[in-house]
Amino acid sequence: MHPPVEPYAHGLLDVGDGQRVYWETCGNPDGKPAVVLHGGPGSGATPGWRRYFDPARYRVVLVDQRGCGRSLPHAADPGVDLATNTTAHLVGDLERLRAHLGVERWLVLGASWGSTLGLAYAQAHPERVSELVLFSVVTTSRREVEWITRDMGRIFPAEWARFRDGVPPADRDGNLAAAYARLLADPDPAVRDRAAREWCLWDDTHVRTVPGWRPDPRFADPGFRMLSARLVSHYWSNAAFLPDGALLDGAARLAGIPGVLLHGRLDVSSPLDVAWQLAQAWPDARLEVVEAAGHGAGHGIGERVVAALDDFAAR
């Protein structure tokens, strides 16, 4: 990883719908533009993202997506309406931010949910993307959501049974993400809090497929639990608000954009076949499989992200 750096500029951009999106820039103001798309949805652009980039060669833009991090209003407040928090809205926010900052084209770095958003943005605005670096690649299709909320119970049966039983019996054979989203909108604070706890407990479990796994300490914070559970269940229950299979079907729109896809062999909750299928449909992308890695930046993926970004900066 590159040395820690601090932002040299930041702000809140009014993107409409009563939403103000936090952004910051760091590195070299005259460097190669890049934008970071965090995971979740709802994880926020934490400072560690800055360290993937050589600060002498990149102008790095970090953004907290609608409703999370330092953006306002905050989705941890159950009174905040999520109707204008969809993939199309987030793609529009990125375009407004790019224009606001005077960027012509930028490299897109995204992980997990950020890879879904990065693909959606690049397919909507390919002329604005110079390269894509994506890791823990997902497209948030209905099949992927079904896998992560139901089929991963074959790997963690006791934990999944608890997750399933966190919703009313009538909802247990249906869309579990949608069932949790309804509980998280319940007028009773105790119902909402219990649902957020159970959702985040499962969210912390299904990625536990590699040695040395540690729970996410942010889930100890009730506010972060509510934020994460609301946003993730909102997007998953609606399959990212995209036509099913749209991002794989639309891969041809990425022609001419160089890409690096990094995925862990042990990422069982987000299986490798999605990244592999994307690489087959996108000839300009290179898929690198990291044998010992699971979901996230550990076990060698982070180092390969740095190497890919260094290589693009040197070209």
Image: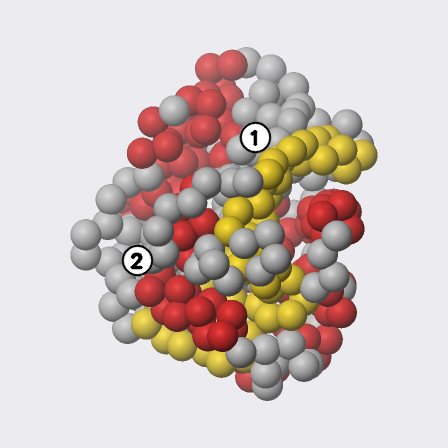
Q: Residues within 10 Å of mark 2 (few under 14, many from 20)?
A: some
* Element type where label 2 sits in the image: loop
Q: Position of residue 232 (x, y in %)?
A: 54, 41
Q: Which mark is residue 70?
A: 1
Front in this rendered view, residue 314 or 180:
314
Above or below: residue 83 compared with residue 306: above
Q: Which mark is residue 203?
A: none
Whether residue 8 sits left or right of residue 200 in the image: it is: right
Q: Residues within 10 Å of mark 1 (few under 14, many from 20)?
A: some
Whether residue 81 sits left or right of residue 180 in the image: it is: right
Mark 1 vs mark 2: give the one in front: 1
Residue corresponding to mark 2: 298
Q: Amino acid at mark 1?
A: Arg
Q: CA distance from mark 1 to mark 2?
A: 26 Å
Q: Position of residue 292 (x, y in %)?
A: 25, 68
The quarter of the picture where residue 250 lies is: bottom right
At a point 60% along the width and 70% down the height, the residue shown is 131
Q: Position of residue 205 (x, y in %)?
A: 32, 45
Q: Disc 1, disc 2: CB below 8 Å?
A: no
User: Which quarter of the rendering shows the N terminus?
Assistant: bottom left
The quarter of the picture where residue 237 lies is: top right
The quarter of the picture where residue 245 lies is: bottom right
Q: Can residue 161 be seen in the rendering of this structure?
A: no
Q: Amino acid at mark 2?
A: Gly
